[in-house]
Amino acid sequence: MSDDLRELPLRERKKLRTRRALAETALRLFTERGYDATTLDDLCDAVEVSKRTFFRNYRSKEDVALAADSDLWSAYLDRVAAARLDGPLLEALRVALDATLEAMDADWERRFLATRELSESVPVLQAHSLGYCQDTTRAMVETLAGRSGAGVDDSRLRLTVEIFVAAWRTACLRWTAQGGEGGRDGLTRLIEQTFALIPDALTCTA
């Protein structure tokens, strides 16, 4: 039993196990059979849970397909909300991302890479992923705006968050295109390299 589960009450452990089983089984079935060819009934039968249990954990088929994304960004938003953010905000957000990636479960990058590859091949998942990105961006802005320590007006704050998200997406796309080379450490290096390019990108000439 992993340490993160061991610390939870029994009921929460069971709930988390079910959620993980749904996400992992969904990713396997969507990859093996195809996203459109796999129904929610297929998934629930494979995990031996009811649809009611499924909808207590995920809102839709798209949500369970992108569980690795939501796991990362839920953990990230929690970290940002609780962290003491000092210095340049963009750098503080990057440092929080590094810490969140480091704390993800041991199998996360495998699931995340498979999720990214699946999303790139399924238009409905691409659209859902973009919508989720917009929701996460808005949540980040709201979280930071509610903190007195942010000290940034709304326009500058939103622009900083949008730059952060663009840098993340650029690094993530490169990592996925490289087949997840280097695993989590490889992704973290690409993130650092991409953020280091931001000053030059802002002064790039046509």
Image (cartoon, rainbow, N blue to C red):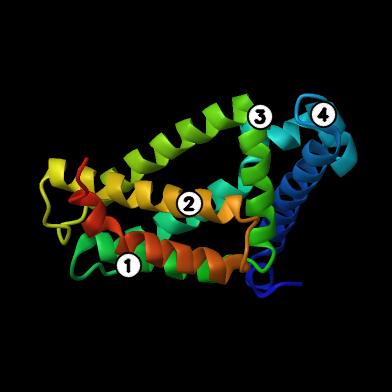
The percent position of residue 205, horizontal first and vertical second, equals 19, 45
133 relative position to 8: left or right? left
Q: Residue at x 56, y 31 (%)?
A: 126
Q: Residue at x 63, y 72 (%)?
A: 7
Disc with the residue nearer the chain's start (4 vs 2): 4
Residue occupied by mark 3: 122
- Give residue 38's mark: 4
Report the front residue among 97 and 47. Answer: 97
Query: Mark 2: few, some, or many residues within 10 Å (few <14, many ≥20)?
Result: many
Numbered disc 2: secondary structure = helix
Left or right: residue 80 versus residue 199 is right
What residue would you read off at disc 1? 83
In terms of sequence position, does the residue under pointer 2 or pointer 1 come before the other? 2
For label 4, the SS is loop
Q: Mark 2 points at which residue?
A: 73
Q: Where is residue 173 in the image (x, y as percent from the top left)?
A: 51, 48
Name the quadrant containing residue 78: bottom left
Residue 51 location, x and y as percent?
Answer: 77, 30
Residue 165 drawn above or below residue 12: above
Q: Which amino acid does the dot numbered 3 rest on?
A: Val
Q: How far apart are marks 4 and 1 (CA)?
A: 40 Å
The three-letter code of the residue at mark 2 reads: Trp
Give SS at disc 3. Answer: loop
Q: Which of marks 1 and 3 is nearer the N terminus?
A: 1
Relative depth, front residue between 46 and 18:
46
Say which amino acid is labelled 4: Thr
